[in-house]
Amino acid sequence: MRALVREHRVHSEQLVQPLFVAERSDEAGAIEAMPGIARLELDETVAAARRTLRARRQSVLLFGIPAAKDDRASSSYDRDGIIQRAIRSIKAAVAGDRRDGRPVLLRIYGARSLRHSERER
């Protein structure tokens, strides 16, 4: 009877794994306010994304901790910013995880900012 009246089901494919990637190794470590969550270095972030995929979760949400911050959040649109490097590294790492030639589905969400010209409006 419960199965007939159940409104919602949560599947592992619907879950999003948050990953905090630190540009500097001295900023990596546990986040006290979030048990089980840590700021990771780039290589650890890639490994965590691969574990997420193996656990049948298909989405990660990246939060970047840049080495330097400014009032324009310029690292968020820098081609070599920590989020951009993390996305490239994760894509390269998971691309070879399937041996049958089919593409790996891993949704990567990262912080996006407005273009410089749009910021000044």
Image (tube, rainbow, N blue to C red):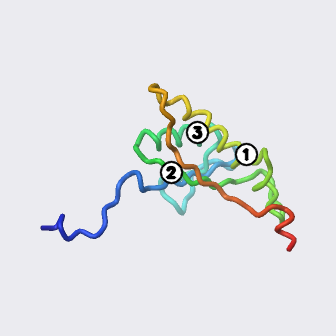
Residue at (65, 44) in percent of width and height: 87
Look at mark 3 in the image and give the residue it sits on.
Answer: 46
Residue at (86, 64) in percent of width and height: 117
Disc with the residue nearer the chain's start (1 vs 2): 1
Tag in front: 1 or 2: 2
Q: Quadrant of residue 118?
A: bottom right
Residue type at mark 3: give it.
Val
Tag in front: 1 or 3: 3
* Vertical position of residue 118 compared to residue 46: above or below: below
**Marks 1,2: beta carbons within 8 A:** no
Look at mark 2 in the image and give the residue it sits on.
Answer: 59
Question: Could you say which is closer to the camera, residue 25 or residue 19?
Answer: 19
Question: Could you say which is closer to the camera, residue 111 or residue 31?
Answer: 111
| Crowd tier of the residue under label 3, counting other residues whose Cα lies within 10 Å: few below 14, some 14–19, many 20 or above | many
- How far across and down, in percent of the image, does residue 21 sit? 64, 49
Indicate the quadrant containing the C terminus: top left, top right, bottom left or bottom right: bottom right
Question: Is residue 79 rendered to the left or right of residue 93?
Answer: right
Residue at (54, 63) in percent of width and height: 33
**Marks 1,3: beta carbons within 8 A:** no
Disc with the residue nearer the chain's start (3 vs 2): 3
Q: Quadrant of residue 69?
A: bottom right
Question: Is residue 42 rendered to the left or right of residue 53?
Answer: right
Question: Is residue 40 rendered to the left or right of residue 76?
Answer: left
Q: Give how far apart the Cα atoms at labels 1 and 3 are.
A: 15 Å
Furthest residue to the top?
99
Residue 24's tag is 1
Question: Could you say which is closer to the camera, residue 13 or residue 39?
Answer: 13
Q: Give how far apart the Cα atoms at labels 3 and 2 are.
A: 13 Å
Q: In which quarter of the image is residue 86?
A: top right
Disc with the residue nearer the chain's start (1 vs 3): 1
Q: Give how far apart the Cα atoms at labels 1 and 2 are.
A: 24 Å
Residue type at mark 2: give it.
Ser
